[in-house]
Amino acid sequence: MGKSQRSADVVIIGGGIIGLSIALRLRQEKLSVLVLESGEPGREASHAAAGLIAPKFEPATEPFARMAIASRDIYPAFCVELRELTGVDPEYRSEGTLMPLLSAEEERWAADLTGSADDSVPLTKLTRGEVLSLEPSIAPEVHSGLLVPGDHQVNNRMLLQALLKAVESLGARIQRYTPVRAIRVRSRGELLVESDATHYTGGTVVLSAGCWSHLIEMEDPSLRPPTRPVKGQMVALQMEPARLLTHNVHSPRCYLVPRLGGRVEVGSTVEEVGFNKRVTSGAVEKLLHAALSVLPALQDCSLIETWAGLRPGSPDQHPIVGLTSVEGLLMATGNYRSGLLMAPITAKLVTELIMTGRAPALLEPFSPSRFARADAPLARI
Ligand SMILES: Cc1cc2nc3c(=O)[nH]c(=O)nc-3n(C[C@H](O)[C@H](O)[C@H](O)COP(=O)(O)OP(=O)(O)OC[C@H]3O[C@@H](n4cnc5c(N)ncnc54)[C@H](O)[C@@H]3O)c2cc1C
């Protein structure tokens, strides 16, 4: 066994958007925080994401919508706070999301969205003329469209830079290149977190290792959160002129997210292919074909980046967040397609949980216990 260090009040496993946002809030409560990260922080799914802060297009269960909207609503303040703490601007934008409908079939598909009783994120129907006056470069054959004023975006890479800087400046320790292998229960009210060289102890441990969370060993295997990797590939183009597009565009074919400075990101595939981040020519071809059919003017623009990331999938596509049956062990994972969106509210509620010992009501539906074996004994220290 490697040497063991009393490390911090809270040990966080994984330095993606979820782990770092929790670290920020815990430091503001004056707890000592250690983040163990197997590589560079913020370089996995959180780096790969499109940055859509878009509750409308995610699973429409009521608890999910409540939490997503609560997070969307505190996002602007979160970004201002990070900018003020660090000088790095996460580029929060609230122009809304436009859904251009380019065929009768797409209009029928969208009728489900407008016809549903769910008006938690309202949308407005647009005529063809209205779509083109908002975004003149959309394909001229567009039939009609929808506008979702409440769906926004952030530049996730800038946000991660700001968050990392803020967390470090507030005094959290980030231990890079430290893959955690196991979490063990110790006798004196502490948990032992094992990496290859060193073992760490903490009164509270938060498992936020994204799609890798289920790989961390535990004495009771039923405690492992049922995460899995869901690959997403994306491409980016440089718009000429830079303001060819100003709204997020969420077409049934693909989505396009314009950044300040003229970069536009196009996503995304959803692939169940395990831990594989290869960019494939077939996916790039499909994404470009879809993007050009929505915004033909992109055909003269430079292709500047292709990439892939692994979303932390969960069996019901909902986050896995909250207390486990092991005292002091919390999960904050399984955010699938919405981890960027969910980060500020997750950090706020997990911090509240750690400070009070009680799960806030908004978090209850996402408890890890919904996946625990019915006959699993309650683990105790
Ligand atoms: C193509 C794509 C587009 C997306 N678009 C959006 C979007 O528009 N909006 C949105 O809200 N969400 C989006 N998502 C989803 C979002 O990216 C994820 O839900 C979110 O980033 C998950 O954050 P995380 O911190 O849980 O995981 P990650 O960012 O993956 O971070 C987990 C961290 O844990 C570390 N780690 C893993 N194993 C260990 C270990 N054993 N020990 C220590 N550290 C470990 C990893 O290195 C990593 O840094 C998208 C995802 C993809 C792939």
Image (cartoon, helix red, strand yellow):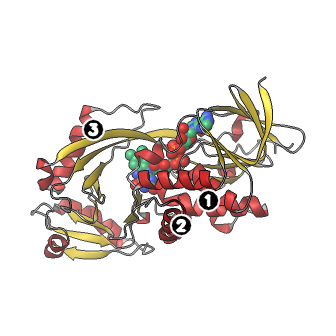
Instruction: Work out whether 16 lies above or below 80.
Output: above
The image quarter in which residue 56 lies: bottom left
**Mark 1 = which residue?**
347
**Image location (x, y in percent) of residue 18:** 57, 52
The residue at the far right in this view is 188
Q: Is residue 51 above or below residue 188?
A: below
Disc 2, SS? helix
Specify the quadrant of the image occupied by residue 117. bottom left
- The circle on residue 25 is none
The image quadrant that residue 289 belongs to is top left
Residue shown at 37%/52% (left/top)?
A: 50
Give the class, few, some or many, for how many residues have Cα within 10 Å of label 3's Cα (few <14, many ≥20): some
The numbered mark at residue 81 is 2
Residue that mark 3 sits on: 283
Q: Earlier in the sequence, mark 3 or mark 2?
A: 2
Q: Give residue 252's position: percent from left, percent from top.
A: 27, 56
State if disc 1 and disc 2 touch (CB < 8 Å): no
Foreground label between 2 and 1: 2
- Inter-mark Cα distance, 3 to 1: 34 Å
Q: Earlier in the sequence, mark 2 or mark 1?
A: 2
The image position of residue 313, as x and y in percent, is 50, 45
